[in-house]
Amino acid sequence: MTLTKSDIEKIIKTDLKDWKYTDSKIVRFIPRSSNLSFGTVVKEIWDYAEKVDHHPDILLTYSGVEITLFTHDQSGVTEKDIKFALSLAKIY
């Protein structure tokens, strides 16, 4: 079940402060830093995605990695996306 915009914004404000809600998706940008290997970041995200069978859109750029979560068959953000984002928040 798709969450409401209000529910999502409340969760972002309290539990997912590094995430933004935009275009019916939640998005996080991890900027480039000298102590972070983007190859490792992408691999860890993808390994987790395979484990939980829920795959984010990942955009790798020179300046960082952008992770976009939404449930395709629901056309919006669901609890599955929130759980995924919370799991990533523990890693990065």
Image (cartoon, rainbow, N blue to C red):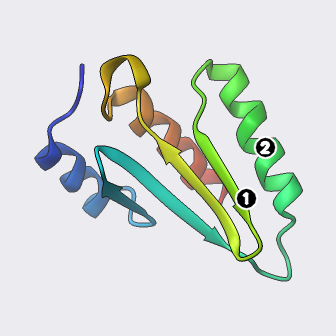
Q: Which mark is residue 81?
A: none
Please tell me which of labels 1 and 2 falls first in the chain.
Answer: 2
Residue at 66 percent across and 29 percent down: it is 49
Answer left or right for 32 relative to 88: right
Residue 83 against residue 89 in the figure, above or below: above
Number of callouts: 2
Residue at 88 percent across and 55 percent down: it is 39
Q: Residue 61: percent from the left, percent from the top?
A: 73, 66
Q: Residue 51: percent from the left, percent from the top?
A: 70, 21
Residue at 11 percent across and 48 percent down: it is 6
Residue 33 against residue 73 in the figure, above or below: below
> Circle 2 is placed at which residue position?
44
Answer left or right for 24 relative to 39: left
Between the C-alphas of marks 1 and 2, the distance is 14 Å
Amino acid type, residue under disc 2 in the picture:
Glu
Q: Residue 17: percent from the left, percent from the top?
A: 38, 66
> Circle 1 is placed at which residue position?
60
**Label 1 crowding class (10 Å Cα cut-off): few <14, some 14-19, many 20+?**
some
Amino acid type, residue under disc 1 in the picture:
Leu
Answer left or right for 58 relative to 46: left
Residue at 38 percent across and 16 percent down: it is 73
Cβ–Cβ below 8 Å for labels 1 and 2?
Answer: no
